Image: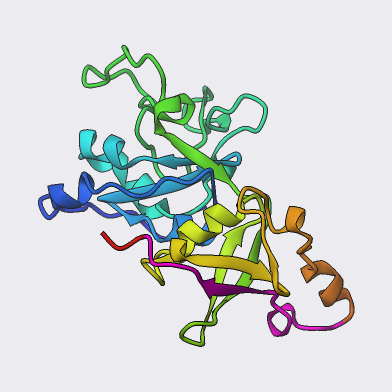
């Protein structure tokens, strides 16, 4: 729910190169992943456990109806919608006594005006919140941290990953730290990991809840994966 007033935005500074930039797709995203896409030219939102890329929608609708979505870019907007109908929440408009969509954040794209208007297109086949073409993946049920230790260069990095990620998908996330992540053998306690299985399936449980009940900071006990250099097969 937005607490600040929405103001008119200038769309002339949209860089088409940014709009068309391809981003590596994943099966699952964390809220931190989504938060990185929080602008009018790169807008992702979470909605009922799914992740939507609304950038093409905003490029098509460069008007004030886009402003609530721009303001909410990079967040979970499930509270805008009814969990059963998956449509925007509704209420009785005190001014008209008529049931209307409830949009305290401001009327947004594909929400009809409260009064008849000649400017309103009535031929919308599928509103964006029900349109599968904007869905790019799912929101993780639980994010977790993992430490990746590169034994070749003695370098550590802590990544936040989706609990559903396989080791291979974690490896893809690690590419932002090391372009040659595929040249390493991934292990835990000197045992090679199954790249097609998750951390849990590889015997690395998420113990955050248990540690917190014991009064222990989970960040002090992040499990580590060890990377052993194999052969640089990723060099062109």
Residue at the spot 66% in from the left edge and 54% down from the top edge: 194
- The x and y percentages for residue 74 are 43, 55
Q: Residue at x 32, y 18 (%)?
A: 116
For the residue pair 71 and 16, the one nearer the viewer reads as: 16
* Residue 83 falls left or right of residue 103: right
> Considering depth in this image, is 181 or 208 the residue closer to the camera?
181
| Magenta residues (range) | 215-233
- Give x and y (percent) for residue 203: 79, 60
The residue sitting at 40% across, 29% down in the picture is 128
- Asked if the stretch drawn in magenta spans residue 231, the answer is yes
Q: Quadrant of residue 114?
A: top left
Residue 222 in which image quadrant: bottom right
Q: Is residue 30 visible?
A: no
Indicate whether 28 appears above or below 35: above
Camera-side residue: 177 or 4?
177
* Residue drawn at the location 38% of the way across and 67% of the way down: 232
Q: Quadrant of residue 25?
A: top left
């Amino acid at each position: 729910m937005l607490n600040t007033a929405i103001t008119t935005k200038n769309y002339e500074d949209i860089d088409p190169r940014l709009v068309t930039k391809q981003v590596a797709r994943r099966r699952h995203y964390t809220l931190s992943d989504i938060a990185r896409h929080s602008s009018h030219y790169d807008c992702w939102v979470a909605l009922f456990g799914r992740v939507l890329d609304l950038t093409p929608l905003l490029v098509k609708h460069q008007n004030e109806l886009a402003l609530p979505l721009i303001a909410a870019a990079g967040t979970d907007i499930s509270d805008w919608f009814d969990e059963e109908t998956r449509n925007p929440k509704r209420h009785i408009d005190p001014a008209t006594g008529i049931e209307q969509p409830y949009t305290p954040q401001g009327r947004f794209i594909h929400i009809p005006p409260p009064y008849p208007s000649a400017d309103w297109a009535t031929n919308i086949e599928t509103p964006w919140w029900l349109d599968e073409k904007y869905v790019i993946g799912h929101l993780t049920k639980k994010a977790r941290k993992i430490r990746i230790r590169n034994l070749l260069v003695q370098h550590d990095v802590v990544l936040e990953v989706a609990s559903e990620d396989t080791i291979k998908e974690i490896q893809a996330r690690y590419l932002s730290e090391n372009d040659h992540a595929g040249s390493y053998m991934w292990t835990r306690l000197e045992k090679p990991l199954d790249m097609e299985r998750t951390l849990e399936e590889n015997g690395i449980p998420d113990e955050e809840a248990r540690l917190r009940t014991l009064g222990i900071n989970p960040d002090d006990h992040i499990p580590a994966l060890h990377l052993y250099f194999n052969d640089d097969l990723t060099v062109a």
